[in-house]
């Protein structure tokens, strides 16, 4: 039972420590929208999304007003578009039409982003998958709210290196197609390994085929709350540190649970999961990097960073799973560069490199996220970075991802501003040694030995 102290404590977290519910994401299955005609498919898509998500934004705003809890984003995720477009789409332009229809539906419902312009190609690509992937640069150039994700590997199947190679080329082309906006299209495109079916966070959200017809997933946040809780523990031992993070994560997740249940009830859509990831923003005091500094690092990137992040991630999960029976998505700590002011400062200070960020992804929730690199970086190098990150996910049985932005016309030391929650980022150097012979080998890296559990 909630007492008056807990109410006051939650109010303090909201007013002074940047606590918010980062997103209410409605997952919608579009499997029954499939049609042999692209035009009919697009109309079916818009009709179904409107039917389920018509009141998503207004409901989120009502809950926010009534409970005093900021709900930053309202979003939609859909069945991977490569599945629903398989019968109708015969050329890349057909998938661009679908992306435009999805964008129109997103605007009509008023959501911030719509995710699921996606393909799952961890073991191989169908013709439909390849058409969708090749359509991504044009699709993201012609739309505003569409996010795309491609899953290129898993612990069970290994890594599809043909898809990895193709994604390096697609990211380069997407950067070029959106060069007038500092290659912003790449900020809405992520390449994953072990992608979850129920992730509410963009750009990797899609509605898995194992899900119900519609579902409500909520992503909470609160790095500022964790930072505040740790600021008074400068000389505390590790046990005290861990217990404090765990208890704080419990409180944050309970706020998300309340919002999820209310949204589910009011929209008459089943509650799916709470994703309890610590998702930073460019705002001062809302930074995962600042938590690492409070734990005892001068900057993220200093020796001990990976251990500190592992500690943080584990305690967040332990606290969260006690607060909700349905924890899913990614759940842990995000370390995007452009979206975290502390990470930006660490890069500018020379403390944080792409190689160190890669090491940190072994123990955090996602991967190399929102990293700006020189526009002249080759497609092969980008594919090599994707392969490295996918290997970490495959071997460690966890989700990893790459959202990297080769900013057209920018070089190391330049700064790029993406705006809003996407923030700004210094352009980071990339290892210049060639990996093209490796990347251009055809086929699939096999699954690791520990994948055989049947």
Image (cartoon, rainbow, N blue to C red):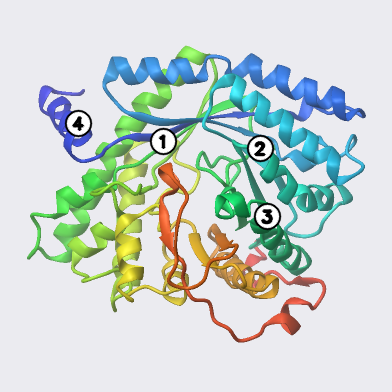
* Disc nearer the start of the sequence (4/3): 4
**Left or right: residue 247 compared with residue 390:** left
Instruction: Give the SS element for disc 2.
Output: loop
Q: CA distance from mark 3 to mark 2?
A: 12 Å
Dot 4 and dot 3 residues touching (CB under 8 Å):
no
Q: Residue at x 79, y 53 (%)?
A: 134
Residue 275: % across, % down? 44, 41
Residue hosting label 2: 143
Q: CA distance from mark 1 to mark 2?
A: 37 Å
Closer-to-camera residue (100/72): 100
Residue 153: % across, % down? 67, 61
Q: Which image quarter holds the C terminus?
A: bottom right
- Rendered image: mark on residue 325: 1
Residue 156: % across, % down? 68, 61
Residue 36: % across, % down? 92, 29
Residue hosting label 4: 10
Q: Residue at x 69, y 35 (%)?
A: 79
Is residue 408 in view from this perspective? yes
Looking at the rendered structure, the number of numbered marks drawn on it comes to 4
Instruction: Give the SS element for disc 4.
Output: helix
* Disc nearer the start of the sequence (4/1): 4
Dot 4 and dot 1 residues touching (CB under 8 Å):
no
| Residue 196 in the image: above or below residue 40 | below
**Label 2 vs label 4, nearer the camera:** 2
Q: CA distance from mark 4 to mark 3?
A: 42 Å
Dot 2 and dot 4 residues touching (CB under 8 Å):
no
Instruction: Give the SS element for disc 1.
Output: loop
Residue hosting label 3: 174
């Amino acid at each position: 039972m909630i007492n008056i102290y807990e109410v006051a404590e939650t109010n303090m977290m909201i007013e002074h420590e940047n606590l918010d519910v980062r997103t209410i994401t409605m997952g919608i299955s579009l499997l029954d929208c499939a049609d042999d005609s692209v035009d009919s498919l697009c109309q079916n898509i818009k009709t179904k999304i409107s039917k389920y998500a018509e009141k998503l934004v207004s409901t989120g705003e009502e809950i926010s007003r009534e409970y005093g809890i900021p709900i930053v984003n309202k979003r939609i995720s859909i069945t991977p578009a490569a599945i629903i477009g398989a019968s109708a789409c015969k050329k890349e332009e057909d998938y661009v039409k679908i992306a435009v229809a999805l964008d129109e539906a997103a605007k009509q419902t008023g959501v911030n982003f719509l995710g699921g312009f996606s393909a799952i190609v961890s073991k191989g690509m169908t013709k439909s998958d390849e058409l969708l992937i090749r359509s991504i640069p044009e699709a993201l150039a012609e739309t505003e709210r569409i996010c795309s994700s491609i899953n290129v590997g898993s612990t069970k199947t290994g890594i599809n290196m043909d898809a990895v190679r193709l994604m390096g080329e697609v990211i380069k082309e997407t950067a070029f197609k959106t060069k007038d906006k500092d290659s912003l299209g790449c900020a809405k495109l992520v390449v994953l390994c072990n992608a979850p079916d129920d992730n509410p966070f963009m750009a990797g959200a899609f509605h898995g085929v194992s899900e119900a017809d519609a579902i409500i997933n909520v992503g909470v946040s609160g790095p500022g709350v964790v930072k505040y809780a740790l600021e008074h523990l400068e000389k505390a031992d590790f046990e005290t540190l861990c217990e404090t993070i765990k208890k704080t994560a419990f409180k944050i997740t309970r706020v998300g649970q309340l919002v999820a249940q209310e949204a589910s009830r009011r929209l008459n859509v089943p509650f799916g999961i709470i994703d309890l990831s610590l998702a930073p923003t460019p705002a001062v005091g809302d930074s995962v990097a600042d938590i690492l500094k409070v734990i005892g690092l001068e900057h993220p990137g200093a020796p001990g960073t990976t251990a500190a992040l592992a500690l943080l991630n584990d305690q967040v999960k332990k606290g969260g799973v006690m607060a909700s029976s349905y924890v899913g998505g990614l759940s842990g700590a995000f370390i995007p560069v452009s979206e975290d002011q502390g990470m930006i400062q660490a890069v500018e200070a020379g403390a944080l490199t792409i190689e160190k960020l890669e090491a940190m992804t072994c123990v955090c929730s996602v991967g190399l996220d929102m990293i700006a690199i020189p526009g002249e970086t080759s497609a092969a190098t980008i594919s090599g970075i994707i392969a490295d990150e996918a290997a970490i996910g495959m071997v460690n049985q966890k989700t990893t991802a790459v959202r990297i932005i080769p900013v057209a016309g920018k070089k190391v030391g330049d700064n790029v501003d993406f705006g809003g929650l996407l923030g700004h980022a210094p352009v980071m150097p990339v290892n210049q040694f060639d990996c093209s012979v490796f990347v251009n080998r055809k086929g699939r890296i096999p699954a690791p030995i520990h994948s055989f559990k049947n």
